[in-house]
Image: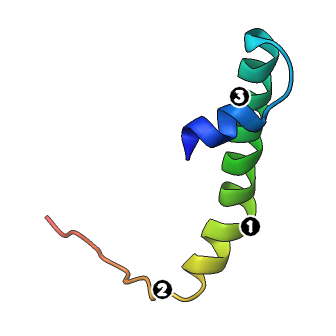
Amino acid sequence: MYGALWRALPGPVWVRLLLLIALIAVALYVLGTVVFPWVQSFIETQEVTVEE
C-alpha cells in the first residue's frame, strides 16, 4: 500500500516527501478534530476520584 501511494505522488523524491508529510499532517488534524471527538461521544467516561 505504501509503495502504491509513493508511486501515485507526482514529482521528484523531495516533492513526494513534502506531499507525504502534508498528507500525514492533514490526516492527524482530521482525526484529532473530527473523528476522535465523535468516537468519544459514544464512550461512557467514568469519574474516578482518589482519596488519601
Q: Is residue 22 left or right of residue 32?
A: right
Q: Nearer the viewer, residue 8 or 19?
A: 8
C-alpha separation, residue under disc 3 versus residue under disc 2: 31 Å
Q: Residue at x 71, y 20 (%)?
A: 17
Give residue 32's quadrant in the image.
bottom right
Q: Residue at x 73, y 12 (%)?
A: 13
C-alpha separation, residue under disc 1 versus residue under disc 2: 15 Å
Label pair 3/1, CB-CB below 8 angstroms: no
Q: Residue at x 56, y 77 (%)?
A: 40
Mark closest to the chain's N terminus, 1 or 2: 1
Q: Position of residue 7 (x, y in %)?
A: 71, 32
- The residue to which callout 2 is attached is 43
Q: Is residue 41 left or right of residue 43?
A: right
C-alpha separation, residue under disc 3 versus residue under disc 1: 20 Å
- The residue to which callout 3 is attached is 21
Q: Nearer the viewer, residue 4 or 45?
A: 4
Residue 50 got which mark?
none
Q: Disc 3 residue type? A: Ile
Q: Nearer the viewer, residue 49 or 46?
A: 46
Q: Secondary structure at mark 3?
A: helix
Q: Disc 2 residue type? A: Ile
Q: Disc 1 residue type? A: Val
- The residue to which callout 1 is attached is 34
Q: Secondary structure at mark 2?
A: loop
Nearer mark to the viewer, of 1 and 2? 1
Q: Position of residue 37 (x, y in %)?
A: 65, 71
